[in-house]
Each structure stands twice: as C-alpha cells, then as structure tokens.
Image: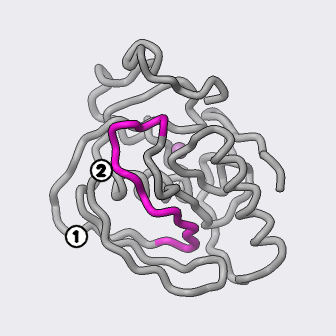
Amino acid sequence: MTIREILKMGEARLLRTAPAVTEFDTPELHALVADMLETMAAVNGAGLAAPQIGVNLQVVIFGSGEVNPRYPHEPPIPATILLNPVITPLDEEEQVGWEGCLSVPGMRAMVPRWQRIRYTGVDVHGRSIDRRAEGFHSRVVQHECDHLIGKLYPMRVRDFSQFGFTSVLFPGLDDNTDD
Ligand code: NI
C-alpha cells in the first residue's frame, strides 16, 4: 500500500468524467482501493474518490464507522467502497451543511445537497450495494460521487459569504495540517 498524492483544485485531472469500472476483483483494483484507504486514513478524510489520486475510474470510498475528527459533530458513516455509483434523490428536500475537501485544503463552505437519497453501485467484487441515506451520510456520498463527474464542492456553493478558511471559521478544530 502507498499513501498517494492528492491532487488539488486547479488540476485538470479533477475535472474529468470518470468511466465505469468494468473488471472486478482484479489485483489492480484491490491495489487501487488499498492505496485509497491508506491515503484517506492518513489525512482523516471523510471520503476519497479515485480521480483525486489521478485515477480516472468510478471508485469512491467513504466512512470509517467512527466519528471523523475533521467532522466531530457529525454521526459515523459505515465504511464503504463503492464503484459505479448512481444517486437518486428520494424527494425534493435539500439540506445545507459544511463541507471540506482534501483537494481544496484548509477551506470549508456551506453546500446545498439532497437531504435523502438512494444510492446504488457495486463493491470491489462486483456485488450490489443499494442503500438509502440522509443527512451527513447523504452529503458525503453526493460529495464523493461529484468527483466522478468533475465537480468540486465550490462549484455547488450558492452563498459565498459562507465559504472560507477552516482556521478562521472553526478556530478550535484540529484540521489536519496536510489538508
Ligand atoms: Ni472531495
């Protein structure tokens, strides 16, 4: 396993639409996921998408089953490896909440997202995943899947008066220095 460099906003490779994974359970896919898990853990990420380490494939990981120290007031999200995701909002209701991104280090913004979604996809073995999510879980899934269509959270911000540096917005929060 290797901790990989996380690409930062401005990098053209973050703006691509990623193709679906077509071969499952391969050594290459397992190695990619292992690198992503190690990279996300090293920086306390809430999630990570393959394009963020320069791999243009529909692979996202998120959650750890525990409260994330970068988001201490949010509930834990199940540790998930999700390929070829499809998100469907369950109703019209939106939520607005704080987001950061490992590709946009040191910043946070209030970002609108669907409150309730269904998300489907497969795991590394090609086995079906089909879940409903709301709140922070729903937000994280939408954020990570946006990376697969070249969208970074600043592109979703509507109120730029609530976009700023983490150190100013949350002076007490111990945001990772690598982030
Ligand atoms: Ni992100």
Q: Tell me if the residue at label 1 has its CB under 8 Å from ligand 1.
A: no
Left or right of 17 in this view: 89: left
Residue at 80% x, 66% y: name it.
Answer: 31
Q: CA distance from mark 1 to mark 2?
A: 12 Å
Which residue of the protein is positioned furthest toward the front in this rendering? Answer: 66
Left or right of 3 in this view: 125: left
Task: Say whether disc 1 or disc 2 marks the residue closer to the N-terminus.
Answer: 1
Give the mark count.
2
Name the kind of residue labelled 1 in the image.
Leu
Residue at 62% x, 54% y: name it.
Answer: 16
Region rendered in magenta: 69-85
Left or right of 26 in this view: 121: left
Say if 103 sits above or below 56 in the image. Answer: above
Q: Which one is in front, 169 or 154?
A: 169
Per the image, is 78 magenta? yes
Q: How busy is the neighbourhood of tag 2: few (under 14 within 10 Å), some, or many (20 plus)?
A: many
Point out residue 49 in the picture as x, y percentages from the top left corner. 60, 55
Residue at 42% x, 57% y: name it.
Answer: 77
Q: Which one is in front, 110 or 137?
A: 137
Say if 7 sits above or below 93 in the image. Answer: above
Point out residue 100 in the picture as x, y percentages from the top left corner. 46, 35
Say if 74 sits above or below 145 in the image. Answer: above
Residue under numbered circle 2: 113
Point out residue 54 in the picture as x, y percentages from the top left corner. 74, 51
Residue under numbered circle 1: 90
Q: Quadrant of the N terminus?
A: bottom right
- Residue 129 — which label? none
